Image (tube, rainbow, N blue to C red):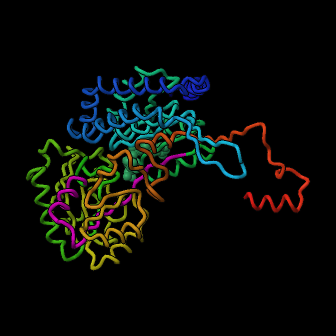
Amino acid sequence: MKNYQEILNSQKEFFDSNATKDISFRKQQLKKFQAVLKSNEALLYDAIYKDFKKSEFETYATELGLLFEELKHHIKKVKTWSEKKNVKGNMANFLGSSYIMPEPLGNVLVIGAWNYPYLLSLQPVISALAAGNTVIVKPSELAPQTSAVMAKIINENFPQYYFQVWEGGVKETTEILKLRFDKIFYTGSSLVGKIVMKAAAEHLCPVILELGGKSPAIVTKSASIKMTAKRIVWAKFLNGGQTCVAPDYILVDKSVKSKLVEEIKKQVRKIHGEHPQNSEAYVRIINKRHFDRLVSLLDKKKTIFGGETDEKDLYIAPTLMDNITWEDKVMQEEIFGPILPIMEYENLEEAINQVKAQEKPLALYLFTNKRSTSKRVFNDLSFGGGGLNECIMHLTNSELPFGGVGNSGMGNYHGENGFKAFSHQKSIMQKTNWFEPFVKYAPYSGFKFWLLKKLM
Ligand code: NAD
């Protein structure tokens, strides 16, 4: 095992030198990061294909392209985001001025997940570096090729006292979590999220937890069914269903269910053909453990489309399961694979109550053309983020904070929110030396008390 403490000490020393406080240094490092990713694009595509047959197109659309956009945005905005901001004063500080100075937190640890291995490990890094921190990234060992390529290209191009990748599984991560960081950013399951938070608590280290959950797609009778089916199919079967914000299940108004199901089948055939196993755009399950887990969720009697599996190829066909209830095994955990259960409801109230009875999801998607319905659902239900007549795309807009709530996580990032996630907002009150209100000081009197009440 590496000498983690020694490397972290060198990062502490580097941070204490104030080198990362310089905005031009940060910009330079972000540009370098951009160049490193660009010049190694071929290696990155090759590694992710080996891990789970993810195509170049999809890797660019859902990982590298988003990283490049985020890098561009941060390079452009880092100066503005770092500037001190004057805020309004208050009476008690008459003739004073108040401002907020964003400052880097220090040494950051990012623990990534395997399902979008580049995006989820490196997007938080962009914000952490822009905010002036040093960074250690621990990618997921479940995607070993992508983990190795990130370690190679980053460790060869950045000094270990500033930005490093540490590879490893549970054993290594457990050791790493004993160290004292200034912020830990974790993406993965809620179960491990609790382990991370407990370890961080030892050092009172703040955490951002990007977790998961069962994200519903609610389809009402006023929805545009064709477009709804198209968008749900894209979002659900993208990355083989291994997307934290994928619609986990459909809750559909009984009166439009059969039409929706037919459109979903048509749409799957249209994009992946009659044999999705031969489709270049269809991603495999990450490993045998997850393959077995997913297969155990399949109920042949309830499968109305797909259901084929091939263990050697870690392939599970895009699958629809109907007449599902909360008692079915597939509804007991986050699916995180290409299985789409369909549940029906009689009225909206019932649908809302069903979702309310579950943990707060990371995402919620509502398909309706009625404003009163969207107003009600978005008012009544709590979830990380989501879409009206759309799935997943909310995470591509860096103006929208991305993160969960309750069991689906805490804290958020993307764009300026990412910068803020890795900054401390330092508050400063500045005073003149020629005026000081006598009312502050004892001995107190009736008059001072009267004046105090007027001032405050
Ligand atoms: P994973 O197995 O890759 O684990 C994530 C990270 O946790 C890895 O780096 C791993 O090494 C580490 N880890 C695992 N066990 C650990 C332990 N006992 N102690 C310390 N570290 C440990 O990913 P996963 O958990 O299978 O990811 C799937 C989950 O993540 C799903 O619930 C999904 O919804 C969620 N997810 C959330 C987001 C988001 O942005 N909110 C994104 C992707 C995935």
Is 82 placed left or right of 55 in the picture? right
Taking the spot 59% from the left edge, 36% from the top edge, the residue there is 179
Taking the spot 42% from the left edge, 48% from the top edge, the residue there is 188
Taking the spot 38% from the left edge, 74% from the top edge, the residue there is 353
Q: Is residue 397 visible?
A: yes
Residue 232, given in percent of the width and then of the height, sits at: 22, 58
Taking the spot 51% from the left edge, 35% from the top edge, the residue there is 82
* Residue farthest to the right, as pictured: 443
Q: Quadrant of the C terminus?
A: bottom right
Q: Is residue 3 visible?
A: no
* Residue farthest to the bottom, as pictured: 346
Residue 339, given in percent of the width and then of the height, sits at: 24, 58
**Is residue 226 shown above or below 130?**
below
Q: Quadrant of residue 279?
A: top left
Is 445 placed left or right of 192 in the picture? right
Is residue 28 or residue 161 the one in the foreground?
Answer: 28
**Is residue 162 shown above or below 348?**
above
Q: Quadrant of residue 226?
A: bottom left
Is 431 placed left or right of 184 in the picture? right
**Is residue 12 shown above or below 353?**
above
Q: Quadrant of residue 180?
A: top right
Residue 416, given in percent of the width and then of the height, sits at: 44, 42
How many numbered discs, if any?
0
Is residue 299 or residue 397 the one in the foreground?
Answer: 397
Based on the picture, tell me whether residue 365 belongs to the magenta stretch. no
Residue 141, given in percent of the width and then of the height, sits at: 39, 37
The residue segment tinted magenta is: 207-235
